[in-house]
Amino acid sequence: MDYVNAKGHIYDIQGYAVHDGPGIRTTVYTKGCPLRCLWCHSPESQNYGFELGWLDLKCIGAEMCTDACILACPEGAVSRDAPSKRTGTEEMIVKPKIDRTKCTDCLKCAESCVTKALYVTGWETDVDTVYARLMKDAVFFEGEGGVTVSGGEAMAQFDFTLNLCKKLKDSGIHICLDTTGFAPTARFAEILPWIDLFLYDIKHMDSYHHEKLTGVPNGLILDNARFLASHGGALQVRFPVIPKLNDSPENIAATADFCAELGEAVKLVQLLPYHQAGRVKYPRLGRVYRLKNVVPPSDAFMEKALEVFKAKGLPCQIH
């Protein structure tokens, strides 16, 4: 199969992924996403470029490193903070302090950090390199397993994603594409032949509220879901249930109606209860998590929501 060894930016490759499609899978996480979901659990995926991350618990102190990170910064964005306890001990050390208003993400401080307390969120790679890494896991793909390309939004790096999927498909690997659906329909038409299953997010059925929650309207997303369903695509719809934001009875019912409208293309609907696992990542990037007062929905609420989808005859589960 003809393909191009396109370059791309990724931030992780995870083996033994059992929640990103059927079977045992390896998931490639690409960088860059046009959405800014308030509950995003992977903020490091949002920007296509590489950012400076700060993992406090890895720091051994500026004195131990002879101020390497401070001296490396050409903008004066890294300085000594007040003494504080080394994580997990009573020992007092001086850690670096980052002024994000001065930081240009040149990442020179991360290059100088021996413990990787200062780190880079991702790296540049190419199709052949990622393919070689994925094929090391091929023994686990027997049966229903395979590779999932996720993000961020994998369609935002279309050349890289398309060519990786082409190369994988030529090797007989089952491919899932995890997508927000927010990309030109022509691109979905082009990639459709190489995708076995689309893991497709539906976040809110009202476009106004969708834009408030994610930064973009939902018209293109819903249109692309209809396009894929009517052109032979297989969809595993993922509906994140976020208390007070998209969990109204009206929106749950409208989402179920839409999934039913897509017909047999919908192989499964997954209701994803909101969780707070990603909130710890925001301070690492110098950001504020805006949903700190939102708590996960109760099991009883999720079961009640699931019944709405079951009533439409949809294959569904709480994930």
Image (tube, rainbow, N blue to C red):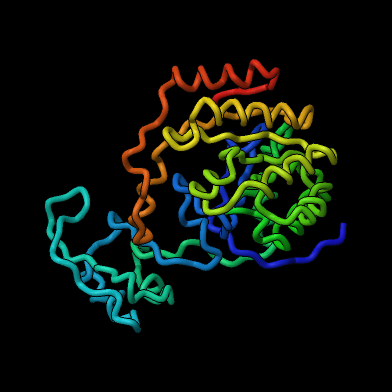
Q: Quadrant of residue 317?
A: top right
Look at the image and tell me in which quarter the C terminus lies: top right
Q: Is residue 300 above or below residue 112?
A: above
Q: Quadrant of residue 234?
A: top right
Q: Residue at x 22, y 65 (%)?
A: 95
Left or right: 110 as drawn, with respect to 239: left
- Visible in this render: residue 136? no
Q: What is the x, y in percent for residue 188?
A: 77, 51
Q: Residue at x 71, y 60 (%)?
A: 158
Q: Residue furthest right?
A: 1
Towards the viewer: 90 or 98: 98
Q: What is the x, y in percent for residue 195?
A: 77, 45
Left or right: 62 as drawn, with respect to 139: left
Q: Residue at x 64, y 39 (%)?
A: 25
Q: What is the x, y in percent for residue 218?
A: 62, 46
Q: Quadrant of residue 144?
A: top right
Left or right: 294 as drawn, with respect to 309: left
